[in-house]
Amino acid sequence: QNLTAKELISKINAIVFPGSILSPSEGYINVETLKKLNFYINDQELRSRFIAIIPLLDVFDDFAPSSLVQLTTEIFSLSEGGLTELQAEVTAATSSPTTDAADWALKTISGGAVDLGLRIGTNFLSSVLGSRKVKENSSKVTTVTQLIPNFANISYAHNTNIYVSPTAGVVRDEMSGININGTVSISASDPDLVLIKDYSFKYGVVDAGATHTEDRVDILSFSNPQLYLVKGISSLLVSSVTNEKSTKTETGLLSWGKNKNEQQSKIMIVTRAEAISFQSFVGDLKKIRSLDLHREFSQKEKDHEP
């Protein structure tokens, strides 16, 4: 918007690829027109960070770069048995006198659009989801990771139109997929605290009918005018039962699933956020780049020598 493509590429190269250039196997960056550049980077993490840095550098004046918020949203499908086992493991752990329950389960709620709401330590949640009984009765549907400049709007959509026929001779267009919206803000007094204002989440999944025209879209949606997220803590919501007739054997972004003949009729949404300073962001870029340039181990590393 402000710089020319050539000037912007020069700034990006100085930060992301100092003293080197991309090899053909890594990707490319080139000028197409005065105000347009083309690029492709094979490494997914480097590509995401490359995209995030563009609006931060596309300015004329000297500036103090904004911090970033890494917002992660994970969607899981769960059976009744999987939810029961998850609740049992969390309850058992938080009731132990030798553990710090406040770090694991800060708040439990019920009612409304959800059966279960938790604020739970991210590392502990990972261990619970990795346990055999929970893993056998759950499936990860998708993960959405966004890098958002501080004070910027979240605007994420991944949707598909589904044409359904609720009654003979009537065709209706319904929308399946994910929508995430809000505005991120990092606390001035605590960099580990992120506020998402006017947060809204909407997830529509196809419930297959006897024929394609009898398909319908189940919608899970919730909103929060002020969603507070703390580094290391995940916000977890599990939907009430929304599907009792699914016979699908796979789980996908737009469809339900079964696992070992037990129907996965619940949706679990896990949300977490972490503030990242611009300096840390650049440092991570350089680390990723350094690892990419050194793909071979030295003989000492192969021999496990210090």
Image (cartoon, rainbow, N blue to C red):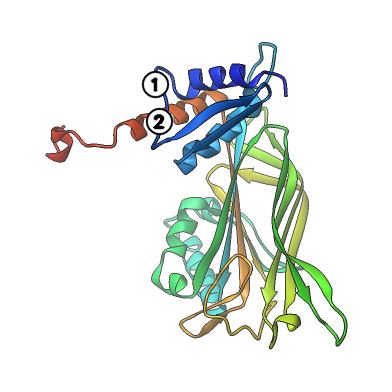
Q: Quick one: which residue is furthest to the top in this view?
A: 62
Label 2 crowd bin: few (<14), some (14–19), many (20+), radius 10 Å: some
Query: What residue would you read off at disc 2?
Result: 289
Nearer the camera: disc 1 or disc 2: 1
Which residue type carries mark 1? Ser
Relative to 67, is 120 above or below? below
Q: In the image, what residue type sits under mark 2?
A: Arg
Could you tell me if residue 240 is visible in this image?
A: no
- What's the CA distance linking mark 1 and mark 2? 10 Å
Residue 122 image position (x, y, % from top left): 51, 52
Q: Nearer the viewer, residue 301 or 267?
A: 301
Which of 95 and 74 lies nearest the eye of the viewer? 74
Q: Position of residue 202 (x, y in %)?
A: 73, 60
Q: Secondary structure at mark 2?
A: helix
Q: Residue at x 54, y 27 (%)?
A: 30
Position in image of residue 206 (x %, y %): 68, 73
**Given the current orientation, which residue lies at the most extreme right position?**
169
Earlier residue among tags 1 and 2: 1
User: Are the residues tagged 1 and 2 within 8 Å (C-beta)?
Assistant: yes
Looking at the image, which residue is at 72% across and 35% down? Answer: 152
**299 sits left or right of 246 in the view:** left
> Local crowd at mark 1 within 10 Å, few (<14), some, or many (≥20)?
few
Residue bearing the label numbered 1? 20
